[in-house]
Amino acid sequence: MGNLSCVVLPRFLAALLLLLSWIFGLSLGTELSFVTCGSVIKLLNIKHNVRLHSHDVRYGSGSGQQSVTGVAAVEDSNSYWSVRGTRDALCHRGTPVKCGQTIRLTHVNTGRNLHSHYFASPLSSNQEVSAFGEEGEGDHLDEWTVQCGGSVWRREEAVRFRHKATDALLSVTGEQYGRPIHGQTEVHAMSSPSQHSLWKAMEGIFMKPSESPPGSRDYSHPHTEF
């Protein structure tokens, strides 16, 4: 298998840069009109106005893996995801993500990948979506294909994410959790495309080819440590 060449920000550095961006209005790559490999972004479900989110809270049913939800809050740091290639396909930092390209989305604060499988989701009994792996390395069920209308994933465009192994689409249909994650919305996968499966890139750090933040980490070496 090929090695991943996409550089991913370490969790503490990503959090620091994002905090400085919020305080001082700093940004990286905001002039870019497309999403690039290595970028750290938030994803908005357009229909339900919630951002893709995760945290170190596990499902009480199904797989028992780390839960993935949708949140209405704009400023929550647990909604940042790093755009990466797969273990079999290079994703060079700053390269535009192509429509039809298969990627991984790694949750910045926990280092686990957006993941799906044939477990039932807790509220709607659709296909469960979880966060899986350690320090950016999981398995083939972490892979999602970007579906968009042109040649590359443009930031202003609504896109879909199709789970490569099960052919299901990342979706939200509005079901809300109670305690301990009261008010957060279930995220799951569904077989048919609809308005519930449309997502848009929002806030974040968009990498240009020349950018490599000091102390950045390459998850293609799974045994290195922070």
Image (cartoon, grey):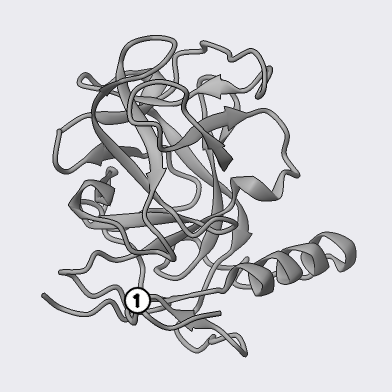
Residue 178 x/y as whole percent: 64, 12
The residue closer to the viewer here, 118 or 49, is 118
Residue 128 x/y as whole percent: 33, 26
Residue 211 x/y as whole percent: 54, 85
Q: Quadrant of the C terminus?
A: bottom right
Q: Is residue 109 left or right of 72 when viewed as pictured?
A: left
Please report the residue visible at 36 percent of the width from the left and 74 percent of the height from the top: 95
Q: Is residue 156 left or right of 204 when viewed as pictured?
A: left
Q: As displayed, is residue 14 above or below residue 69?
A: below
Q: Quadrant of residue 117?
A: top left
Q: Is residue 179 left or right of 211 when viewed as pictured?
A: right
Q: As displayed, is residue 140 above or below residue 14?
A: above
Q: As displayed, is residue 123 above or below residue 26?
A: above
Residue 114 x/y as whole percent: 38, 46
The residue closer to the viewer here, 60 or 167, is 60
Q: As displayed, is residue 51 above or below residue 90?
A: above
Q: Quadrant of the N terminus?
A: bottom left
Q: Quadrant of residue 37?
A: bottom left
Which residue type carries mark 1?
Pro
Number of residue marks = 1
Question: Which residue in the structure is indicated by mark 1?
Answer: 222
Q: Secondary structure at mark 1?
A: loop
Please report the residue visible at 75 percent of the width from the left and 70 percent of the height from the top: 16
Q: Quadrant of residue 6?
A: bottom left
The residue closer to the viewer here, 95 or 121, is 121
Q: Is residue 111 left or right of 2 when viewed as pictured?
A: right
Please report the residue visible at 83 percent of the width from the left and 65 percent of the height from the top: 25
